[in-house]
Image (cartoon, coloured by chain):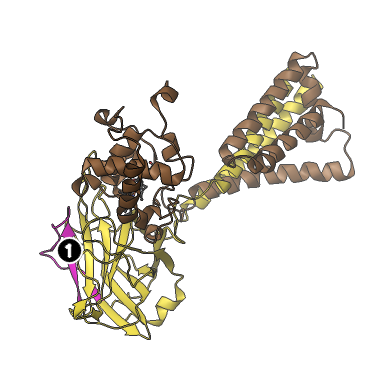
Chain colours: A brown, B yellow
Amino acid sequence: MKGPLAKTVILLVGMYVFLKFILPLFTAPLPASLIFLYLALTLASAMIFYTMSGGSLDEFMGPIGRFLTGTGQTGIAGTARILVFVLFPLLVGWQTYTRLAPSDMPPAENRTIHPAPPGEFVGLANPYERTQDNIMMGKGLYAAFCSPCHGANFDGKGPAAVGFNPPPANFGDPGTIAQLQESYLFWRIKKGGVGLPVEAMPWKSAMPRWEVELPDEWIWKIIMGEYDGAGQSPRTWEEEE
Amino acid sequence: MGYKKNCYVALGLILVVTGVGASCVFASDPPPEGGAESVAVRLHLTDDAISADDPNAPVWDTIQPAEFKLAPQVHWPDRIQEVTVKSVKVRGMHNGRDMAILLEYADPTEDAADAAAIEFMVGDKMAHFAHGQEMLQVEGGAVNIWYWKKEHGKATDMSAKGFKTIRAQENQNVSATGAWQAGTWRVVFSRPLQTGDEHDVQITPGEWRNLAFAFWDGEIVDGAVREQGSQKAVSSWWYVRAEPPPDNSMYGYVVLGIALAAGFEFFLLRRIRRGNES
């Protein structure tokens, strides 16, 4: 098993194991489509590599050609060859079936979680000073108005959270407010779910439109209390550059 | 070995790898987002008449329910922080003409003001789950609400487009019957799939529609009804679909696919053999 083909197969299996099982130990698991793309790229590179490095496509393809034509084959290899010839059309048939069979799954939803804010909400600074009093007031308002959904611990696990899809944001998650500027939060809190653009599916969001109930001053202080309570800090202008 | 032959082998290899890869991709990408157990209600296709007025008809027990969690309505005033109904089991069926949806949920007491509702988006415009309230960047549509209340003993077919716009429709197409037993309500709603009324949701087998739920515990506590008006248990949007009749035309395509693949193998082999000879 020293031919270029065998090496490539080993490389592909290794890549697959790495992408599918080892990488997820460190980061979020890759979607299957991405893993497939990486493997396809690896295969293409291997083929180009062998042809470029003089080895010729022949050397790479030779074993496959011999396998398919059955040249000098006996025993297991022969059976395997027949199996491949039978399995390939069945696979195509199965593919056709799964594509055409009526799906029981609702339409896939690609909801944009952080769409661009309207222009008037870009670059606003919190007009209130980060004093202990202001933070405390913000936390109090948060407990009264936001915690039923976003949770007393800022983790998105409030008593009302379970009924809603999408679920209320978990502010401790580095993917929410830590990525955002205060100005962006001001927009989201003021205008709520109904203020989102079409790609964020406003019709599904339970986030209230707080401008009809809370004055701006409270919203700015809630933002302070929210960052402080969740142990996050807002993304600033400098980082944006 | 000829160069041409290798090109064919390479082509074949790429096709096979793509096929296998694609099947993996479509088999294992995650289902759509959703925190609850279910994301959709399926209206099972049956040949029989739809049991529209008996929530305890035995046929319901042959259907696997979808289950949805509910939240106290804390989205807009007047809010409520705690509600009685925490989740609902939903079963559905249709026979190509009529449909029925059965809601089953726990409520310890039977009260005159107990009520349940199913909300649908109407037509192609998206509507916010909270009574089709105004959206700021998207032109929204209206919602159709089927409302049942114990003391009314029937359903009311309603429309809304925005808070405080809810009203009963001129054409009443929905019926409902409830039965309470040992702490469980079973309420069955029924209607023709199509009504020809532009204010109603129209259900076409095979097409996905959006629905949401609401429940009120009408128990009297200290002289007042516990849950009424906007103080209720709610869900946001989920999906519903009437099961389409079986379609056998696809088996023709499956056979065609198999034949094409076998033909491809045959020509690939012939090419390789010819390449070997030259």
Screen quadrant of the N terminus of chain A: top right
Q: In which quarter of the image is residue B166?
A: bottom left
Is residue A140 located in the magenta-colored stretch of the structure? no
**Residue under the point 30% across and 54% down:** A145
Amino acid marked by disc 1: Met
Q: Identify the element where label 1 is drawn.
A: strand
Is residue B155 located in the magenta-colored stretch of the structure? yes
Q: Residues within 10 Å of mark 1 (few under 14, many from 20)?
A: many
Q: Where is residue A53 in the image (x, y as percent from the top left)?
A: 78, 14
**Residue under the point 59% across and 42% down:** A29
Q: Is residue A206 visible?
A: no
Q: Is residue A9 visible?
A: yes
Residue B220 vertical position relative to residue A138 in the rendered view, above or below: below
Which residue does the numbered mark 1 point to in the structure image?
B158
Along the line of sight, the residue nearer the viewer: B159 or A104: B159
Given the image, what chain letter belongs to the residue carrying mark 1? Answer: B
**Residue under the point 24% across and 38% down:** B137
Residue A129 vertical position relative to residue B170 in the rendered view, above or below: above
Along the line of sight, the residue nearer the viewer: B246 or B135: B135
- B207 left or right of B258 in image: left
Q: Residue furthest bottom?
A: B182
Q: Position of residue A110 (x, y in %)?
A: 42, 42
* Magenta region, residue range: B154-176
Q: Where is residue A16 in the image (x, y as percent from the top left)?
A: 69, 38
